[in-house]
Image (cartoon, rainbow, N blue to C red):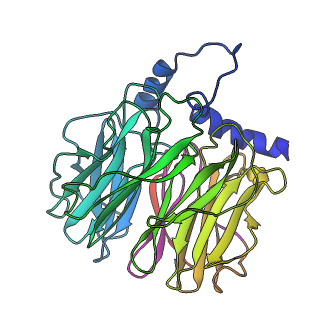
Amino acid sequence: MVGRLLPLLAGLLLGGMASAHDHHAVSDAPKVDYAKVWLEKQQTAPRLAVAATFDATGRLWLARVVGQQIFVSQSADAGRSFAEAVAVNREPELISADGEARPQIAAIGQRIYVSWTQALPQPFAGHIRLAVSDDGGKTFGEPLTVNDDTRPITHRFNAMLADTRGVTLAWIDKRDGAGNPDYTGAAIYTARSTDGGRSFETNRKLADHSCECCRIALAVDTDGTPVALWRQVFGQSTRDFALARLDEPLRRGSDDGWEIDACPHHGGALAIGRDGARHLAWFTGAERSPGLHYRRIAGDTQTPPQRFGNLDAQAGHPQVAVHGRHVTLVWREFDGRHNLIRAMHSRDNGSRWSAPTTLARSAGAADDPLLVTGRQALWLVWNTTADGLRTVKIKP
């Protein structure tokens, strides 16, 4: 099992300099100029991470990072062609856009919300940024910083939900642990705007002791309340998943018992059905059952974790979507030559699953898969160096 996990974990941990800033370094380890490494990564890393959403009319909106700017474009034909891109931030700034860190976009009528993490010169530091267009993406207002703690520390890995009532952001925040070596991990903070992103309520802490570098998943409950899924540090170093409505305490989402004193850079996925059931997908390196898992939680009832994906092919970075009783899982694998996007389907609310199929493949570097729901279909959005941006209509 360890042999199968090593290639995946090496990429995760080294790719994000995972534990250097959040855990006590070994005293005899060679000194590394983390500030230099951090800045070089922000300036030179491939900007493959994109964000995508469909609006109510069926247009596909895409946000991507080019250099030190975010550009938004729209497509009337599900990604086969795009209109001319519009710059979101007129003043260039360093932007995190790789792996677990990616921009976010939402389209509500003529209002387009775009959020991202501004990378600061200090290692692992950032600000959560938001810019809004009120004219259907033709122009964007000046970006504002959402985190009300503005010290140059970790405020990163933004997630966003928007509807006609407003916009909610969640992110990983180290304000509570800054200067406190006994504080474990980071925290999950949220903020909400009810005036179209012009201003935000005071930041609110959802939970202490989150993992430091795993993205947050947000989904909408049946009453419109956001629900978050994130990797939590339980005890000293058990990194399993927690789940919470933004107005309730957290509950445990997974109980794998993964003991690891570093951040895996591997967030989970969450979708909520019309019946209120939570559909979770995640990765664990726990000895007893390593790999990808799926679970459905309905009230106090939860299904046993169900493994999926090929661990020998480094299966990881899942996404999940639900429509009625139809649940779709997609994830990424590597066959030694190509990155693959694999998929499975359930027609009975996650009880039984189809055999895995391959939706797309590409050589070279590639982003993680995105699942985007359109007016009448579910789409895979996948950005690659070899083949560019790909949109694939998913047929169960």
Along the horizontal axis of the image, is 186 left or right of 255? Answer: left
On the question of residue 345 being in view, the answer is yes
Q: Is residue 367 above or below residue 359?
A: above
Magenta stretch contains residue 358: yes
For the point 30% across and 54% down, which residue is it? 114
For the point 66% across and 13% down, which residue is it? 30
On the question of residue 396 being in view, the answer is no
For the point 28% across and 50% down, which residue is it? 130
For the point 73% across and 40% down, which residue is it? 7
Q: Position of residue 303 (x, y in %)?
A: 72, 75
Residues 283 and 56: in front is 283
Q: Position of residue 278 (x, y in %)?
A: 57, 74
Along the horizontal axis of the image, is 303 left or right of 326? Answer: right
Q: Position of residue 208 (x, y in %)?
A: 53, 48
Residue 78: quarter of image? bottom left
Q: Is residue 149 above or below residue 292?
A: above
Magenta stretch contains residue 56: no
Residues 157 and 147: in front is 147
Specify the segment rendered in magenta: 356-385
**Looking at the figure, which quarter contains the C terminus?**
bottom right
Residues 301 and 31: in front is 301
Residue 270: quarter of image? bottom right
Q: Position of residue 172 (x, y in %)?
A: 47, 46
Along the horizontal axis of the image, is 76 left or right of 206? Answer: left
